Structure formats: C-alpha cells, structure tokens
Amino acid sequence: MNNSEKPQLVIDVPWLEPFTQTIEAQYVISELDYLSLLFKEWQAKIDKTKGGLDPFSKGYEKFGLIAQADRSILYCKWAPGAQNASLIGDFNNWDREANPMKKDQFGVWECWVPPKGSQPGIAHGSKVYTGKSTSSQN
C-alpha cells in the first residue's frame, strides 16, 4: 500500500501500519456517523422552520416573482453569500432602497411589493433586477 492510500494517521504514526484496516474501518464509521448526525440536525432545522422535507423540497414553487391574490408580488431568491439585497426595476424607478429584502437562515431573500391600486405591484413585462452586495465588495 503506497502512502497516498494510507490514512493520514498511519502516515504520521508508522507503527500503526499493522492496524491500517481497522483504522480505515473506524474512519468510515465515524464519517458515516458524522454525516448521519449532520443530516439529522439539518432535518430538524427544516422541520422546525419549513414544516418538513416535503414543503422544503417544493421550494421551486416559491422562488422568483409570484403574484398573490391581493395583487401584491412576493419575490424570493436564494443568495446565501449576499450581505444585503433589494429588488429594483422600472416598477420602482431603479431605487435600491424602495424594496429591501430580508434573509432567512437558509440564505433565501424575500420581499413583498404591494399592489398599485387595483393593479399588480409589478406590471407584466417590467424589467427587474436583484441588487446585492457580498463581503468581497467595497
């Protein structure tokens, strides 16, 4: 067995080489235990905040511009690296401060655009853009 195939522990402590198979098996079990624990933690977060895996898995129904019954518009975007975000476009004269977005713990940003009288908050065919900044921007 060459060094690239050995666990790092066996490379660092050569006298453990006779126990390589046991060490590898324990590493695999530990890794699986860790991944199982990580999955359970995320599943608990999703259950608590999103109502379970089924509603969470239907996120595609939530993202983008979604017209509401009251003619308001809900806009959702996944941007976990953003520090702040706002919905801008011709509907608000490209004003970055008119429609700021709020971020949830999963990196999903959302904002509501109220209706304009009896018309939708954003007219069909409007130009829209998500303005955002990240920590790497000044």
Image (tube, helix red, strand yellow):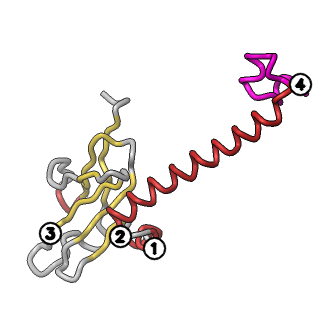
Which residue is drawn at the image coordinates 82% and 30% (left, top)?
Answer: 20
Q: How many marks?
A: 4
Contact (Cβ within 8 Å) of mark 2 with mark 1: yes
Amino acid type of the residue that numbered disc 4 sits on in the rendered structure: Asn
> In the rendered view, would you say 77 is above or below 118?
above
Res 55 visible:
yes
Residue 108 placement (x, y as % from top left): 35, 55
In the rendered image, which residue does mark 2 sit on?
51
Mark 1 lies on residue: 54
**Amino acid type shown at disc 2:** Gly
In which quarter of the view is residue 90 placed? Answer: bottom left
Above or below 123: residue 5: above
- Which of the marked residues, 3 or 2, is nearer the chain's N terminus? 2
Q: Position of residue 64 (x, y in %)?
A: 36, 65
Q: For the magenta stretch, what is the residue range?
A: 1-17
Q: Is residue 59 visible?
A: no
Q: Which residue is mark 4?
A: 2
Kind of residue sitting beneath label 1: Asp
Residue 77 location (% of width, % of height): 36, 57
Contact? badges 3 and 4 (CB < 8 Å)? no
Query: Is residue 30 toward the left or the right of residue 71 in the image?
Result: right
